[in-house]
Amino acid sequence: MAGTSDAPATGAIPAGQAEEYLVGTLEELPAVGGAVVELGGRRVAVVRDSAGTVHAIDDTCTHANVSLAEGEVIGDTIECWLHGSEFDLNDGYPLSLPATKPVAVHRVRLDGPSIYVTLAD
């Protein structure tokens, strides 16, 4: 995806507002699955679920230090490929062990085919 830059998409950001990043286009995402982008020093998985909804979560599994974007997407969950923990793409909470901590969920905005992400705190 094109969003490997730390440049915000919206230019100057007023104080107290989070930066919004242009991370790529819908055409760059798999029909179901994810891609990794680097934003503000964070690895973020941008994921399209089975219904076509685009989500953005921290890319690193909270149980093991591996990429979640490489996992299988089933419905609106993503499964860590190493130990099988499933995470809800809507709220980041693990749905199965061994993970017990959620991953951060980031705000996604679509503008036509363009995908924008605002990082959570």
Image (cartoon, rainbow, N blue to C red):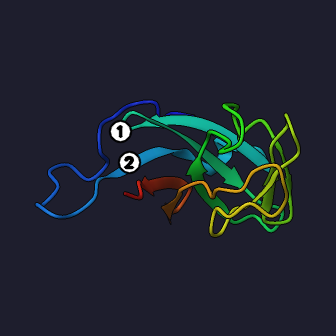
Q: Which mark is residue 40?
A: 1
Sequence-first tag of 2 and 1? 2
* Marks 2 and 1, how far apart at CA: 9 Å
Residues at circles 2 and 1 in contact by the CB criterion of under 8 Å: yes
Q: Position of residue 33 (x, y in %)?
A: 78, 47
**Residue 49, quarter of the rendered image:** bottom right
Q: Position of residue 48 (x, y in %)?
A: 72, 55
Q: Position of residue 4 (x, y in %)?
A: 46, 30
Q: Residue at x 37, y 57 (%)?
A: 121
Question: Is 91 placed left or right of 30 in the picture?
Answer: left
Q: Residue at x 75, y 51 (%)?
A: 99
What residue would you read off at disc 2?
Answer: 21
Q: Which mark is residue 69?
A: none
- Quarter containing the N terminus: top right
Question: In this rendering, is residue 16 above or below 115?
Answer: below
Q: Position of residue 118 (x, y in %)?
A: 40, 57
The kind of secondary structure element at disc 2 is: strand
